[in-house]
Image: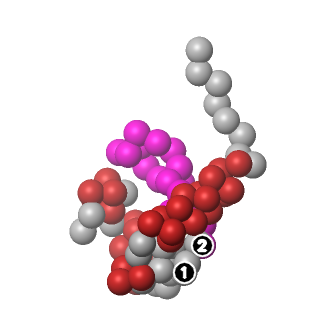
Amino acid sequence: ETEIDAATDGLLSKLRESKELTGKLYEATTLHVPGKLGSRILLTIGCGHREKWDTGRAFRCAAAAAKALAGRPRLKTN
């Protein structure tokens, strides 16, 4: 169990077990999570199989995250 999974009371594990969170390459999933994370939402990005991880894939995963977040409204902090 990862720290994030623990902080969400096992939500990530439950979603993976039910196949609602697949890890499919570049798939973005926004989750509304309890306050233990210090954030109201958690964005997950599917990065594919671990053995195929490299810097190019890391860059493309970061781009997928940026694209998923680009259209979201932002809260102003003063």
Residue at the outermost right position: 71
Is residue 35 inside the magenta stretch?
yes
Residue 42 vs residue 11: left or right? right
Image quadrant holding the N terminus, namely bottom left
Residue under label 1: 24
The quarter of the rendered structure image containing the C terminus is top right
- Which residue is rendered at x = 40% and y = 66% of the image? 11
Spot occupied by residue 56 in the image (x, y as percentages of width and height): 51, 69
Disc 1 to disc 2, how far (Cα)? Answer: 6 Å
Highlighted range, magenta? 27-44
Check disc 1 and give the amino acid type: Lys
Q: Is residue 21 visible?
A: no
Where residue 29 sits in the image (x, y, percent)?
Answer: 58, 66
Q: Position of residue 60 (x, y in %)?
A: 57, 66
Q: Nearer the viewer, residue 49 or 73?
A: 49
Q: Which residue is pictured at 37% across the width and 79% down the height?
A: 50
Asked whether 4 falls inside the magenta stretch, the response is: no
Per the rendering, the mark at residue 27 is 2
On screen, residue 33 above or below 55: above
Whether residue 42 is visible to the viewer of this picture, yes or no, is yes
User: Residue 49 at x, y = what percent?
Assistant: 42, 83
Q: With respect to residue 27, does 69 lie above or below?
A: above
What amino acid type is highlighted by mark number 2?
Glu
| Label ID, residue 3 | none
Circles 1 and 2, Cβ within 8 Å, touching? The answer is yes
* Residue under the point 42% across and 82% down: 52
Horizontal placement of 28 versus 23: left or right? right
Image point 35% across, 83% down: which residue?
A: 51
Report the residue that reaches farthest toward the top: 78
Q: Residues within 10 Å of mark 1 (few under 14, many from 20)?
A: few
Q: Secondary structure at mark 1?
A: loop
| Vertical arrangement, residue 44 with respect to residue 16, above or below | above
